[in-house]
Image (cartoon, rainbow, N blue to C red):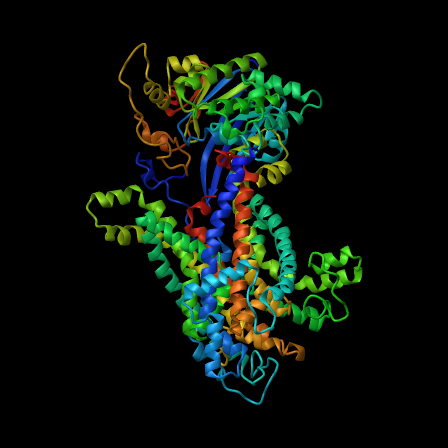
Amino acid sequence: MRLPPFFSYIMRRIAISLVVLLGVSAIAFFMAYLLPSDPVTSRYPDITVEQREEMRRQMGLDQPLVVQYARYMESVFRGDFGQSFGTGNSVGEDLARRVPATLELATFGILFGVLVGLPLGIVAAVRRGRLSDHIIRIFNLMAQSIPAFWLGVVLIFFLYFQLRLVPSPIGRLSMMHTAPPGITGFFTIDAVLTGHWDTALAALRQLMLPAFVLGLGVISPIVRITRSAMGEALGEDYITFGRALGLRQRQLVLGDAFRGALVPIVTTFGFIVGNVFAGAAVVETVFAWPGLGRYAVTAITTSDMAPVSTCILLIASSVAIANLVVDVSYALIDPRIRHEYAR
Amino acid sequence: MTESLLTITDLSIDSLRDGTRRRIVEGFNLSVRAGEIYGLVGESGSGKSISMMASVGLAAQGLDVRSGTVNFGTRRFAASDQKSLRGNLSHGVSLLFQNAKGALNPFITVGKQVERVLRRRRRSDIQGELKELFRVVGLNYADLGRKYPHQVSGGQAQRVAMACALATEPALLIADEPTTALDVTTEREMLRFLASICRQRNMAVVLIAHNLSLVSEYCSSLSILHAGQVVETGNLAPIFAEPLHPYTQGLIAAVPDVDSPRELVPLIGSVWGGSSELDRCRFSHRCPHAMPRCERRIPPAVKRDGREVHCVLYEQEVSA
Amino acid sequence: MNMQDSALLPAPATSGAPPRRSMWNRFYFGLFGGDFLGLIGMALLAVLVFVAAFGPLLVTHDPLLTTPDTLLPPSAEHWLGTDHFGRDVFSRTVTSLRIDFIVAGAGVSGAILIGSIIGLVCGYIGGWFDDLVMRLVDIIQSFPLLLVAMVLVLVMGPSVESIVVVTVLINIPIYARVIRGETLRKKNLEYIDAARCSGASEMSIVFRHLMPNTLSPIVVHGSLNLAAAVGNVAVLSFLGIGIRPPTPDLGVMVAEGTNYLVQGAWWMSICPGLVLATTIFSLNLMGDWLEGRLDPRRSAA
């Protein structure tokens, strides 16, 4: 691979993402601004009208919206995301504790979804029109149709209240365990790294149900796209030619056809990341998971301006970064795209 | 007649789409001798490729191979058992496609593609054999081996595909319109090359084409297919000298001849204009000699001057 | 061969008639293409729509009436039990279904209307206007739409109307994008050129010739989108930002029920949720079936 032209493509792609993010930040700020609350009154509920006006002037809230946005962006670039009156902390501090929780949940959820979704999609494509294809289709439509919040409630009712198979749904660790020393921020991994095996197991048991519910929402788009992309790839002449040459079916399906289907499959990654954050808001609420999603929901319902704009900005940035990774990975997957860039 | 390498008998194929069954190939027969070039001619959609693919176990999804047997060498297979056909014939039969670029995996260098086919048969000196194969098909491995399919020309891609096919050391090569996607000059070159390889390796070729005049330059025997029915089959010379079936006559009348210019007569109508649900001659709707009898059953084969013709016109003479 | 005399004539007009089929077979294969799931989806949906439409006639109790009979399990009197205010869960579920159908249906219809017009105009005009609108759509779609919906509902004040408006807003990009793509594909086809050559005005080309052809993607996306919209309305109310109590809503009912699981009152959450899941499932089945019927790319495969 000739690196320099490819590198310049990546730079160009990053520049585009930054422009999009600038637009996103403006909208995120504006949306938080629209929230029916006044940051001064909500922080200092018992002040006089004069004091309030004075505070507003000090905080720059009397300035035009554009100026406020510019100041907001300036502080964002300094790493200052403002204060949350709900928790009393700076938003940066709050997020530092909550983002790893969501990342751990999302990683396990996506991993589960991909590990189940990819094989199902491949089987459905290979056995198109057969019984297994129909069964996968029914399963998939069901996975897509069951509301995550309800599934969470049902699972908690049966597996916890009735059967006591899972620990109480109260966040990342039960009361009996203390959080392992922070290395990656993932309780399961940190506990393993530091040798706290029982803590690792306890964290995993807490994680199981929410990750399952979150991951179930990931399965459906993956199965859909894998089935159609694999179906298309399996119909390509090079697969028939490979079969005519006597190459093994396993090699042709999992090697040749899968590689051909990989670009559309990877394309859904950005969409999935967005979906998972939305799903996390629901799943974290049901399972009392102390993450970004629940933080955002609480902030929105209490009209907590700074966390709201920061959460929206953060999630939109994650989606943008996911899409960037997707675009770059195209070149790694497909030599035709790689050479297109090099030109 | 020397013994035949591939014999297909009474192959019938149905298509199952939208819950309806359509008969697309009816009683297809073919017999190819070792080392010969056999022409299979018909318009687009006449079932040439479908028949050949099904007879080597590569019938597409949605097709139902209803009947037929395939003899390859000394072995005999039921055409409906596509799995065993595929398993057993992948060593003896290779394919070439119309769209050579599409037949090559776009994600692997052309050198690797030939190499992995080679690895299925050989254990030693793969690199040497690889370079030799590239030389045989007229390509330079050092130049092209590391290129991806999208970086080579259509003619080069067809030669790479040929190298892949030759790597399996086939006794029979089914070339499915291998030159249609190439331009006219490359087309001749490719066919001459195919013919010479065929001679050198004593490899039989089934050359599927819609261009009758092109096929006639290279093959020794010929089958003409119309709407899934064989209309005339046999040695090339008598068929060309005196075409019996009205369709063959029409096809030859539509071929321009530089030596004796005459008015070209186009064939009217389309391949599938007539119904294929019933046992009947499927050419009758385009046939100048059509008569009520044509609609009543599939015309039986009539042997005459080293060929078979499927038309009621000649049946009359025999029975009379 | 057993053929009638008429078929002996050279013109085989009748000889191609397919084998006779029963009425049921013709209906099943003609409409459903042998797709059993499509049939199930339609049947389920028909029942649910019937229940929603005639809800007020079907309820056994006043869905808002609080009684001292709290947290009663399902019985002959209360088919799905009662909630913490002694309200009849069955009656509340039926009433919610009606509200959720109306909200999601109105939201999706609005999004189809506005999104299609935007998509048609963008696809037909092209140029900088198209670029601008499509970049805007990109930006909107990169947002966490659930959170955006929550914020917008709060800004407009939580009410049924604002949920409808928000559903319209967040779904517009889907249709703008799909219809634009479809318009781009169709606008250079021969029959549009033919219409233009025969002197049709731009307006008539867009609305009489292009628009009818965008119908099948709208129908497919519409039904799948309706499923998603029903889910999203319920999610919003579950999170406490949608339809507010005491107005019955499936999401609200599940949320309220979670507090009484510990007392074993499973019917409060599980029954309305099951109805919600069935509704979404039937809409998805229908969308899947329509996709198979109307998308030539898929049915050809």
In this picture, residue C54 sits left or right of residue A200? left
In this picture, residue C127 sits left or right of residue A133? left
Which residue does the image show at 43% across and 23% down from the upper left? B182
Give x and y (percent) for residue C78.
56, 82
Depth order, front residue of C268/B195 = C268
- In the image as oriented, which residue stretches furthest toward the left? C199
Which residue does the image show at 36% across and 35% down from the upper left? B274
- Height in image: A107 above or below A56? above
Depth order, front residue of B275/B253 = B253
- Height in image: B246 above or below A11? above
- In the image as oriented, which residue stretches furthest toward the top? B259
Quarter residue A157 falls in: bottom right
Depth order, front residue of B285/A241 = A241
Using the rendered image of the protein, determine whether residue A115 is visible from the camera's viewpoint: yes
Q: Split into 4 quadrants, where in the image is the N terminus of chain A?
A: top right
Give x and y (percent) for residue C171.
43, 61
Using the rendered image of the protein, determine whether residue B18 is visible from the camera's viewpoint: no
Give x and y (percent) for residue C19.
42, 46
Quarter residue A167 falls in: bottom right
- In the image as oriented, which residue stretches furthest toward the bottom? C68
Give x and y (percent) for residue A168.
70, 71
- Height in image: B125 above or below B53? above
